[in-house]
Image (cartoon, rainbow, N blue to C red):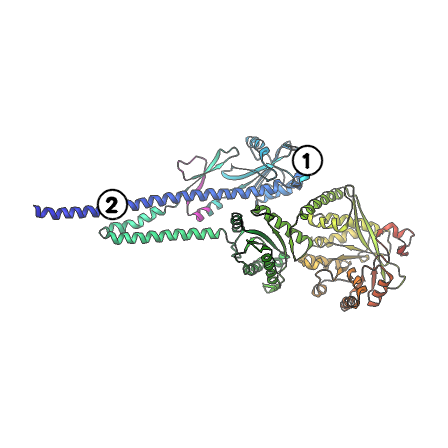
Amino acid sequence: MSGNTLPRQIVVLVTAVLLAVMAILWLSLLSVRTTMDESAAEESARRVAGRLRNMQEQVALLASDYHNWTDLYLDARDRELDRLASNYGISAHRGEVFQYAEIFDGPFAAPLSWRAGAGLAPQSGLLSEPTRAALRKIAPGLDPKRRQSHDFFELRDGQPVMFSGSYLLPEDPDLLAGVVPGSAPIAAIGKILQPERLQDMEREFAIAGLAVTTVAPQTDIRAALPGVDGTPVAWLRWTPPQPGTQLFWKMFPIMAGISGLFVVISWSAAMLLRSKAAGLIEREAISFDRARIDALTGLPNRFAMREHLGRLRTRPDVDCAVLVIDLVRFKLINDTVGHLGGDAFLVEFGARLRTIADDTAFVARYGGDEFFVVFSASADLDRIVEEKCRQISALSEVPIQCGGVSFDVLSSKGLVFEDHRGMDHDELLRRADRAMYSAKLRETLEVVRYDKRMETEDIDHKRVERELRRALAAGEGFAIHYQPIVPVIPGARPVRYEALARWTSPELGPVAPDRFIKVAEASGLIMPLGWLLLDLICADMRQLQGVGVGINVSPAQLMSRGFAKRFHQVVVSHGIAPERIVVEVTEQVVMRDDVTIAQELIALSDSGFRLALDDFGTGFASIGYLTRMPFDELKIDRSFVRSIEEGQQGMRMVKSIIGLARAMELDIVAEGIETETDAVLLRRSGADFLQGYHFGRPAPVTAWIGTGDPGRDPKGV
């Protein structure tokens, strides 16, 4: 008995040990399955909640732009329904940016609402009365300076809609200061949480069955969609990934089949677990990187750049600067070689910028044709930025070939430095963007650095814009002065006058033409201003019988399709022959080498108007552009007349320009003739016509027809 018992005991003991070991292994495997499933469920909940916050923030950003807009505030205050419809209504109707919009209270007796696909006319109320009542309580507590809005969800036709509401206020600080609390209307926009977005989240987060439910799920795997008062109006529910369960069933046949070889099985399980974990980590890393990389250029995107700025704020020993690069004439590239060609241009430009990236320069594509470079260093930041900007300029010297066409690399660049360490990066980006905008206005390719004067310029710009809008609406305050253009023959009478716009504002007084025309171009008022001035000029031309008039036309006007046709119609309707008018354009048309501009210039020439290239030699004109466009005259800028008096170099320059014009069979007008000496020198140089204070200062039309002779001696005026 004892002999048989010992083996049995050994067998039992060994079996017990093996069973205990296997039990531990199985229990461990079950524990791993549970832990992995729970971790995956928690991670899916965190990601879904994070994505919802991200989408709500995007809607809030849209709301902050639309609800803090001076023009919309004025339109709402004045109950300009058509203008409101052209902003809120058309955006909601098209459904590309948001699908719902409503404005209520303030000057409106009844709410104005718009829905996707429902047209531009306001419809019946969109929001429920309890929702409006809640917004009335919440809106006064929102900070207009931070452009806060209140985010909430509502169900529309079974679909969740992300809303964001706040008072509709002007961004103009003067107007904002005059708004009586609670008197402004309340506006809300809504964007549908599309099923396609849910499907994208399913694929990205490896979850299943993501759907909206109005019944609170009896599980932690859910995400609440809060209503206007914070109470959930619906929930998102889904089935989280179960990597632990998948792993368990993969391991089950192995564990069951070779349980006696538990060492081998344990080793295999460890290797498999490590492999699975590595795969999960790798996929997570890929997903993380894709969310922060621009798909077209491969550069970091705006999210990665903002994260980089956030990391820099945690380092008090590091100074920071931001450079904004906005490509000039990118629309021309797309018009010429299509969007694929435009994409190729962006890819090549991005590749060039990547060459300057290092520990001190973080390069990112912010979107569209806009790129950012974030500079950081603990010392010598000015020197580093200066060197990097030189490198960027060098990268732009070589044209980019795309679609078989060579394009120059032109860009507007704005630069800003932190004025203190740890400066809020939103403010830093805003200042950089403002400096870039200033570069655009100046039409310079140099880097423009932000300074405090830009804030003052913005305020001045808005004052001029406000007064200009008022003057255009009233049709008052504008006048035309005329300066004679005479042949080079001594004592000759004027053959033409150049029309020069003047504006006097009751609040601002006389405003310089360069100042109000620049504001008109930047604010979109150049078209109504141009038509008003053209009517004034045509009325004056009926008094200047037999004499021509030169009219300055902005490149911004020429970029409007159909401009030439309407220009011709207005002139003819006044009984003026097109042959009496010379359309003068500056060399900015070359900087904005746009297909539409070329078409409109050709159409003006075909209609009988003469074309003159004004201020030649001061901008970007090229011989190629002169040969492609039907110009009749070339006006030499006054700066070259001044250079003649300084020596032979100036004289050679003027003669070279005149020789070029002669070769192209163009008439030559020399501007800035202030003395008889200037007139004699330009006559000898070969100019055809002269213009300047020597022959008369700009004056109203009555000054030139006072004797009934438009050709009388202008020097007495």
- Marks 1/2 in contact by CB < 8 Å: the verdict is no
Three-letter code for the amino acid on which mark 2 is drawn: Ala
- Disc 1 target residue: 178
**Mark 1 or mark 2: whose residue is earlier in sequence:** 2
Residue neighbourhood size for the residue with mark 2, other residues' Cα within 10 Å, grouped as few (<14), some (14–19), many (≥20): few
Residue neighbourhood size for the residue with mark 1, other residues' Cα within 10 Å, grouped as few (<14), some (14–19), many (≥20): few
- Residue 75 visible (yes or no): no
**Where in the figure is residue 466, as x and y percent of width and height?**
72, 43
**Where in the figure is residue 266, as x and y percent of width and height?**
27, 51
Residue 250 or 308: which is nearer the viewer? Answer: 308
Residue sitting at x 11%, y 47%: 6
Asked if the magenta segment contains residue 212, the reply would be yes
Q: Is residue 646 above or below residue 451?
A: below
Asked if the magenta segment contains residue 607, the reply would be no
Residue 218 or 339: which is nearer the viewer? Answer: 218
SS label for mark 1: loop
**Where in the figure is residue 133, as x and y percent of width and height?**
57, 30
| Placement of the N terminus among the 4 image quadrants | top left
Three-letter code for the amino acid on which mark 1 is drawn: Gly
Left or right: where 412 falls relative to 656: left
Label 1 vs label 2: CA separation? 78 Å
Residue 569 or 245: which is nearer the viewer? Answer: 245
- Disc 2 target residue: 23
What residue range appears in magenta? Answer: 201-221
SS label for mark 2: helix
